[in-house]
Amino acid sequence: MPGGFPTPSSKTTESASCRHSRRMCRICQEEASCCSRGRRTLCLTTPVTFPTLLDEEYAVRQESFFYYLFGVKEVGCYACIDIDKEEITLFIPTPVLAHKIFMVVYDKGDFEKMYGTRTEYVKDMEMVVEKMGTKKIYVNYGKNSDSGLTTLVPEEKWMEKYPVDKDAVHPILCECRVIKSPQEIEIMRVAAKAGVECHLEAMKHCRPGVLESYVLSKLESYGKENYNTDIQPYLGIVASGMGAATLHYRLNDKLIEENELILCDCGQLIQGYASDITTTFPSNGKFTPEQKAIYNIVLKMNRTVEAKLKPGVSWRDMHLLSERILLSGLKDLGILKGDVKEMAEKRVGYLFMPHGLGHLIGIDVHEVGGYLKSTPERDAQPGLRNLRTARHMLERMAITVEPGCYFIDFLLNDGAKLLGIPTSYIDFDKVLFTHALDSTLHEVGRSEDRRRRGDYRDGDRPTVSRGTISLCFLAAENCGADRSVHGRKGLEGHTRRLVDLRSCLSFYVGSRATRWSFCWGFGAVSYTHLRAHETPEHLVCRLLLEKKKKKKK
């Protein structure tokens, strides 16, 4: 295993899930809402959704609450917990014998060996629940405060003869998931370490002339090869240049160019628990002065919040603190003018950091429990309403610290007007000057009249820094320059072997269709023409340049 860090055994996950179930039962026993007399049973199901009209198998991730309580990876199962006796019964689909020809099929004995839980078939669920002496059934029904979607609950016909409580269990389970057990923390450390190593691998392979998808593939394949990560916790993002200004960029298909910033937002999933890491670094391994200035502002935001975090601290206050650091830093650069406290009160910081500071994390990337009836309500102000929680920090609560700084055309113009946020504090000439120096290649073909204030294409202003930068430094001290690792003060002294593509890349400024027409024009190019450290993309660039030189002769 890379770095010598042990991966938690499957037994750790299984025993942890059993402890989660017992913990939930004991809280239910203490809760007044669950103190009615008689045997009480919690029924849970794991829904499965496949594309319709297709019969292929697809990667499916277990429903989060079900995995938390039982540690079961197989889908299509139900489970019951006898709350009073703290006993679990797992119900699995009846195996189809014909399936044994094509796939691995588990029966009751297999499940009992794997999970150490009493196992029955779904068709016998009514009979088993009745034999338990059940007087009331609780189901995990509730709304996710991030997505607004509600949990799916079993709706079996036989359940109608029992009183069904849909309100008591969900907030208890959410609160249980917020506070991590020592076993969960161990697994999450491995997930974070795997994510760090994957990001370092992405930096190692990132260079001008390759596609964003190439960098993403290197990151994901490293996780598969070294940590057996078959499913990603969320769709990865590798965005370069202007694309990085889109918070949820999904294309990952642009050719990376010289002097661009790369925003890499990817995590890893280890034994059902997610990591979420975002890093920003220059495509050629060296920041421009303007890029470095903004990067260090965001780095200061990240480090300051991490130093302040402790039980009892308000997450809302941490977000406002990061905004003040951002506003102060931009003022020192001359991008903003005026009183920082006044700008913060008028929500100017939202124009440059339109997302929340971070989020709870665990089995889900955006872990449940952000807003419950017992926690502070969501603030309606711009920026603050994007916070995924406003809670006070608790011991063993896991949360990400992801400040950022964006220059988004819409927000700095029409968006600010719609929200009533004054833009008089912004020196737009300085913003455009900073942006113009950020990537000279983007200026090709742009006429002077388009440099007027606000007269830019949508997304022309790229992001310059964002992310849980701190996680990237965990392995930095043990790596050499060949691993392309960030130092704590940025990328000073950062070394990387590069193929010089400055002249070649000038051909690629233009529409995506034009770039691909160049590539396809060569037909089947033999890989034997590749030089040392040269990718197929580099080969195409080199052949284009050679072709142009021949025409001149």
Image: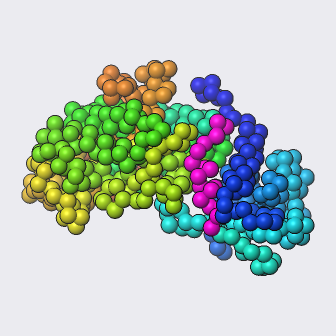
Query: Left or right: 6 with respect to 381?
Result: right
Query: Left or right: 345 with respect to 316?
Result: left
Q: Which quadrant of the view contains residue 76? A: bottom right
Q: Nearer the viewer, residue 266 or 21?
A: 21
Q: Which quadrant of the view contains residue 287? A: top left
> Quick check: can you spot residue 366?
yes
Q: Nearer the viewer, residue 167 or 177?
A: 167
366, above or below 161, in the image: above
Could you tell me residue 141's position as x and y percent?
63, 67
Q: Main secondary structure of the magenta part?
A: helix
Query: Left or right: 483 with respect to 91?
Result: left
364, above or below 503, in the image: below
What's the residue at 59%, 66% (across, down)?
142
What's the residue at 81%, 66% (across, down)?
38
Give the magenta part as a residue range.
167-184
Could you tell me residue 177's position as x and y percent?
61, 50
What's the residue at 11%, 45% (across, down)?
338
Q: Is residue 169 magenta?
A: yes
Q: Is residue 384 magenta?
A: no
**How many numbered badges does the structure rendering display?**
0
**Quadrant location of the C terminus in the rendered image:** top left
What's the residue at 87%, 50% (across, down)?
112
Could you tell me residue 549's position as x and y percent?
25, 40
